Image (cartoon, rainbow, N blue to C red):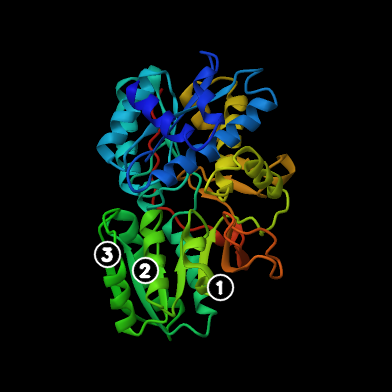
Amino acid sequence: MKLQRLALMLIAAGTTVLAAMSSFAADSVKIAVIDPLSGPFANVGEAMVRYTQLAADAINARGGVLGGTRIEIIALDSKSSPQEAQLALKSAIDQGVRYINQSNGSNVAGALVDAVNKHNERVPAERVLFLNYSAVDPALTNERCSPWHFRFDAHVEMRMAALVEALAADSTVSKVYLLNQDYSFGQQVAANARGMLAQRAKRVSVVGDELHPVGKVRDFSPYVAKIKDSGADTVVTGNWGNDLTLLVRAAREAGLAASFYTFYGNGLGAPATIGDAGVGRVYAVAEWHPNAEPASMERVYQEFRRRFPDARDDFFQARTILMIEMLVRAIEAAGTVDSIAVARALSGMNFVAAQGNPLGDVLMRKADHQLIGPLVVSVMDRQGAPTVRYDVEGSGYGFRSTLTVTPAKNERPTRCVMAWPQR
């Protein structure tokens, strides 16, 4: 309980709504967000809690689930540690939580998948579902797939395929430097970038491939110096959080005249940090951004800005809305919050625009529990440029779409062999 109170205090310092999260009724549907709320990635974890709270509040405002039961969000600090995340999972289960969210760190997600599998086998009456909306190591829906794990984000292979398609169409790219975090996710980004560039952009050479410690580098200038010395005109990185912000800051300060093809360069401080140097040169891939179609997502974006006017981040994860909406649809379809019934209802679920999905048509693929949805590659530009209505986090810079990948084109083969329990 001390860990929970500490996490809530950290978030409440920047927002007002989350301070009342524990006031819901005891019979609420509890969802635990297990993410870093302290340490170098605390800003990312706090943003994830806000996004999830926004989605839950929309459900509660229209009457909750199963005839009036409210959704309750409980924030728990993973400290970016697999061990701490497992302790947080135990705390959540002790509080009656049967649904957990986690987003930051595929190493943390892998530990949680293992812990959830063991718990569900050991205590079938208290099974837990793991709703993953940003841990994107492909193995989590391939070799390590689980009936209890559902991923609502495109994994590394899907995201990199979209980035490489955009990069291959960019005639200014000839030399690429790969710089990524040294854990399973960053290693997958580097390996997929190398393989896909060799297949789809044969004129492009990889002039550097380096991994760095996660969340421990305070000065990226030595890495930027290596990039400059290599003659690279483009950097491909999956870095997120502080590891991305500090990298682009060092690049700006060193005057690095290179393009950045990123997984997460469209938010959480990166655009403001790099400033004018990023115009036309910082690319990002995501399921959506505030200047992208469909226009129906604009209402969600505006509601976030209204609810959290003092937040340092903007809403840029449409998949958080999908996750909560699809969970509620699964609970309603099952007619119960029983975890295995909900899991079977969510497995294979279509959620289309005609049913109220503001992002369009998506599928939670039954074979591996990987969401199949759209992806958009966008490039940084000044607010007010054509199609750039909204900036990011008050920076004066926003993003415009350069490539849209349909769900059918975004789908990748799976190696998952799903093993459901007998009861």
Relative to residue 189, is residue 58 depicted above or below?
above
Relative to residue 258, is residue 10 depicted above or below?
above
Question: Which residue is drawn at the image coordinates 51% and 64% (left, top)?
Answer: 284
Question: Which residue is drawn at the image coordinates 30% and 47% (left, top)?
Answer: 107
Q: Which residue is mark 1?
A: 279
Relative to residue 110, is residue 163 depicted above or below?
below
Rendered image quadrant of residue 346: top right
Q: Is label 2 in a helix, a strand or a loop?
A: helix
Measured in 3D between alpha carbons, the distance from the residue under mark 3 to the one under mark 2, in whole angstroms, is 17 Å
Question: Which residue is drawn at the image coordinates 61% and 30% (left, top)?
Answer: 57
Q: Is label 3 in a helix, a strand or a loop?
A: strand
Q: Which residue is mark 3?
A: 211
Measured in 3D between alpha carbons, the distance from the residue under mark 3 to the one under mark 1, in whole angstroms, is 26 Å
Q: Which residue is mark 2?
A: 250
Relative to residue 176, is residue 385 depicted above or below?
above
Q: Position of residue 295 (x, y in %)?
A: 73, 53
Q: Quadrant of the N terminus?
A: top left
Left or right placement of residue 324 versus residue 224 in this view:
right
Three-letter amino acid code of the residue under disc 2: Ala
